[in-house]
Image (tube, rainbow, N blue to C red):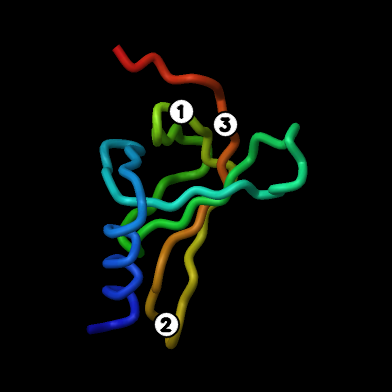
Amino acid sequence: MTRAAFVAQMLERYGEEAVCGGQKAPVVLRSLRPNDLQDSRSICTAPAEFCPREGTKLSCGGRLYTVLRCGGRYLKNRRLYTWAVLQQEGEEDCE
């Protein structure tokens, strides 16, 4: 099993589904600054093939986020996973 496949398997097991630009993927979200309750930014970890673009909207866990920045972590020129900094927009209408 490759390292990227291992990361994808862990995200599948422990992540929750996110949708961005028609793509769906399991992601893990965590607060960018856990000690600052006023900061609504989060860091998103996603599988290598999930590549949201800056400025697009991402929906996860009943909340809507804007992608502020996005990139990947690489090992020997292979992408292991995708990361993104997200700004929470507010509650999503889940009817």
Determine whether 9 is above or below 65 in the image: below
Residue 24 at x, y percent in the picture: 27, 44
Which disc number belongs to residue 90? Answer: none
Q: Which residue is mark 2?
A: 77
Determine whether 76 is above or below 56 in the image: below
Which disc number belongs to residue 88? Answer: 3
Q: What residue is rendered at 33% in x and 66% in y?
A: 10
Do tag 1 and tag 3 residues touch (Cβ < 8 Å)? yes
Q: Amino acid at mark 1?
A: Arg
Q: Is residue 29 left or right of residue 42?
A: left
Determine whether 82 is above or below 52 in the image: below
Where disc 2 sits, the SS reads loop
Where disc 3 sits, the SS reads strand
Foreground disc of the pair 1, 2: 1
Determine whether 27 is above or below 40 in the image: below
Do tag 3 and tag 2 residues touch (Cβ < 8 Å)? no
